[in-house]
Amino acid sequence: MQPGRTASTVTTLAVILIFLFSYPTYAQNSTPPAGLSPYWQPAVARWGEIIIQYAWERKLDPDLVAAVIRKESLGNATAVGSDGATGLMGIMPFDWRPEAEELLNPWTNIQCGTRTLAQIIRDGKGDLFYALAAYNGGWERTHSRTTRNYAADVMLHYARSVAMRHALSTETNWIAIFGVEGACRLNTVTVVGPYRPFARYTERPWLRAHLPTVPTGVPPHAVAFSFPDEQGEECRVGVWLLTEEGTPLPRLTEQKFVSPAPVATLASAPAVPTSSVVITTSVVIPTPVPTITSTPPITQCEGGPLEIYAWELDKALSPQGGWTATIFIQGRGGDCMYIYAWNGEVKGGPISTPITFDVYMPDRNGLIIGTASVTSAGETVKRGLYITPP
C-alpha cells in the first residue's frame, strides 16, 4: 500500500470476471448515508454504491474509505503497484486474502479493504493517524516519513469531504480535530486544516498554552469509525470542525451527499486491456474497468498545481477492419477550466469537466501511441499513452 505507485513498463493484466453479487443487508436499526460527500472527483465518486455498502457493514464512514481509495489508486480499479498492492484500496494479495486477479474486482477489493482498515483502526485503539500509517506500511513502519505523510494526506482529504457535507468550503480557515470519545478516549488529538500544518497534541493538565482540543459536550461532525473495546463498550473516532479560535462550526442535521450512480453489471466478462502509461508527471493511472455509465459532476475547484489523468476507457474492433480506443482525459488544479488535446489536436474545452473521445487505428494489429494534454491558466501538462489492440 505504498503511495504514489507507478508502472513504467507494459503491465499485462489478467481477465477480470465480474459476477452478479447479492447485496448484504445493512445493520439493523441503522440507515446508511444517502451518498458520498460532494467533495470527491468522479474517478472516486463512481464507486460510491460499493463504498457505502461495505463501509457501513464495518461501521466506517464511507468518506474515510473514499479518502483511502483516492490515495491508493485515484479511483482506478486496476491499479497495481510495484510492490504488488492491488486495486482500489491497494490490497496486498497475501496467502490469506483473495488472489491478485480477484482483488481487481471492485466489490472484492473494497470488501477486503474495509475489513482490513476497520481491524487496523481497532488494533490502534482508535488512533486514526497511526492506523492509517500502519495500513500503508505495517505497524513496524508507522514512524517513517512516508507512512506518516500518507496518513496526513488521507486525513486532510477526509476532513475536506466532511466540511463539504456541512456546507463549508474546503479552503476556508477551519481546522478539523480527530479524537476518540467513549470508553477508549485518547489524550492525543490530531489536527489538520486547509491552512494549518498537520499536528498532533497530547493533553497535559500542567501545560497552560492554548492547544486545540475536542470540544466538551459537542457532537462530532462525523464519526470515522466506531467499535467496541475489550469490555464491549463503544468507542468512536470523531471529527470536529472548529474555527482557529476553537469555536465549533455549525453542524448540519441534514448533511449534503451526492447520490451514487449505480455500478453497472457486465453481462459477460470483459478482457482487461493491456497498456502502459509513459510517465510524465508524479501520478500515473493504469487502465480502469469501464463499469460506470455516468458520474457525478465536479462540484468544486481546489486549484493547485495542474495535473492530468488519462487512460483508455474501452477499445473495440471496427467494422472497417481496424479498431477504436475510447480515451478519457481529466484535468485537475490550475484555474479549473481545461482545454484538452490529443497529439496536439484540440478535443474539447475550455470546460471544467473531463472528456472522452475515440481514436481510430486502421491497422487491426497496430498500436495507438499518442500524447494527451491539458491546458489551464496558460500551463500545459502532458501524458503519453501506449495502447495495444483488443
Image (cartoon, rainbow, N blue to C red):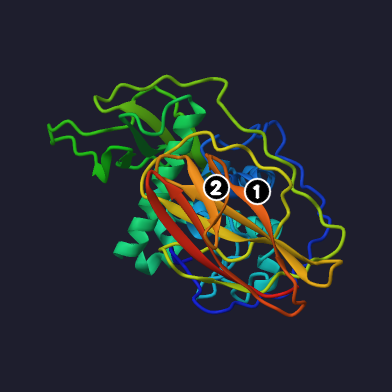
Drawn side of residue 112 relative to residue 195, left or right: right
Instruction: Depth check: give the residue in front, 358 or 242.
Output: 358
Amino acid type, residue under disc 1 in the picture: Trp
Identify the disc placed on residue 66.
Answer: 2
Drawn side of residue 8 relative to residue 188, left or right: right
Which of the marked residues, 1 or 2, is nearer the chain's N terminus? Answer: 1
Vertical comparison of 61 with 77: above or below: above
Q: Which residue is mark 1?
A: 47
Secondary element under disc 2, as helix, strand or loop, is helix
Instruction: Depth check: give the residue in front, 371 or 132.
Output: 371
Residue 388 position within the rendered picture, expressed as x and y whole percent measured from the top left: 67, 75
Q: Residue at x 48, y 37 (%)?
A: 161
Q: Residue at x 32, y 41 (%)?
A: 192
Residue 344 position within the rendered picture, expressed as x and y whole percent measured from the top left: 52, 59
Query: Spatial distance from mark 1 to mark 2, Cα to Cα?
Result: 9 Å
Secondary element under disc 1, as helix, strand or loop, is loop
Amino acid type, residue under disc 2 in the picture: Ala
Q: Residues within 10 Å of mark 1 (few under 14, many from 20)?
A: many
Q: Quadrant of residue 365?
A: bottom right
Q: Quadrant of the C terminus?
A: bottom right
CB atoms of marks 1 and 2 within 8 Å? yes
